[in-house]
Image: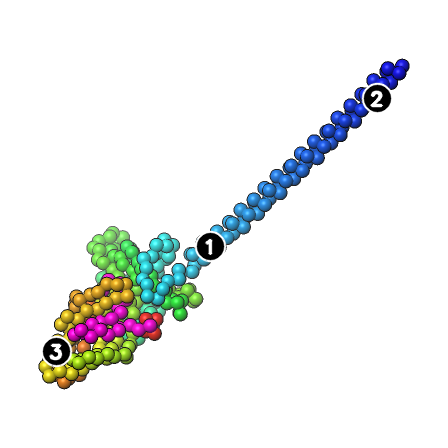
Amino acid sequence: MKKGKYVLIVIGVILIVLLIIWGITLNIRQDRDNNTNNVNNNVETMDNANAVADANTIAEEMFDPPVLDNFTIELVTDRDMFYSVEENVSTYLQSVTDRNAEEIYKFLDEDYIQKFGVTQENVLEHVENYSTSVRFSAQEMYQMLNVDTQITTYYVVGFVESQVFGDLGDTEDYYVTLNYDAFNRTFSIMPLKYMFANTIDHEAENEQIKVTMKQYVTYMDRVEVTMTIQNKTANQIDVSNGATLSFYEGDTSNNIVAKNNEIVAAGASQDVTLTFSNNIQTPENITILGLEVPVIQDETIKK
């Protein structure tokens, strides 16, 4: 009888121990599952946060032009911006082929309008003239941001193909400048390779000459510099002889593609215009008969 009682007690103790072990194991599993869920939730939260941050970054890059130095023209590598500029140029060219003076005038940049005296009545004289519809394709483009105005200028190099009844025909090189106003989300066109112009009034002199700068006009392929030259010698001088133009990008051009009034008589003073070749760069100094004169000063580089 006593032996049977002891057996029952031992079995009861074993059952109690097993129940305790089972309970501890269950608690451990629940804690581990909870920790795993917490970790997964944290990872998911981090992934969501990173995804939002990535989306914001992409949106900023798509809609805000990069901040560039005023003196630096850089190659456009952003594909979205590249094709957006190309599409805007194509829209402008459609109005040109339609000879729609009102629409063309709306596209033109105010700086271009003022420089060339463009009105809605004479606008067709200041833009391209195509006998057929054309299709534009951009090959490369460069950008320069005016930090003060938040206007990004795009210098576009490409070609146009004539279209007759949908068939493509002859091609020709095409250059155009487009200004994008990030604040107002608008663009404007400066055709015919025109980049920008500035009126300047600084001067320099040496024993031979006095140079008073008046204006420079920058195109993608050339720069026109106009200045008043006073000849202080007893002989006539050729202002174009040995003249060079240096650029902020580091290059120098002595290739004068056009000149006007370059011969200045002894003791005379007159306006002279020299046109140098350019490769989408920003002029810095002009050297006339050994005298170096700034073309652009800090306050004039900003359009």
> Is 289 colored magenta in this rendering?
yes
Between 31 and 93, the one nearer to me in the picture: 31
Query: Quarter of the image holding residue 287?
Result: bottom left
Q: Earlier in the sequence, mark 3 or mark 2?
A: 2
The one of 218 and 138 positioned closer to us in this rendering: 218
Q: Nearer the viewer, mark 3 or mark 2?
A: 2
Q: Is residue 22 left or right of residue 199?
A: right
Q: Which numbered disc, 1 or 2, marks the residue that appears first in the sequence? A: 2
The quadrant in which residue 2 appears is top right
Q: Which residue in the structure is indicated by mark 2?
A: 9
Residue 194: quadrant of the picture: bottom left
**Label number found at residue 237:** 3
From the image, which quarter does the N terminus lie in? top right
Q: Is residue 27 above or below residue 57?
A: above
Write the residue at 72% across / 29% down. 22
Q: Residue furthest left?
A: 235
Please give the residue where the numbered disc 1 appears in the rendered image.
57
The amino acid pointed to by label 2 is: Ile
Tag in front: 1 or 2: 2
Q: Are marks 1 and 3 in contact (CB under 8 Å)?
A: no
Q: CA distance from mark 3 to mark 2?
A: 128 Å
Q: The disc labelled 1 sits on which kind of residue?
A: Thr
Return the mark for residue 257: none
Label 1 vs 3, first from the N-terminus: 1
Badge 1: residue crowd in 10 Å (few <14, some 14–19, many ≥20): few
Image spot of residue 147 (x, y percent): 39, 67
**Residue 7 visible in the shown view:** yes
* Mark 1 or mark 3, whichever is nearer to me: 3
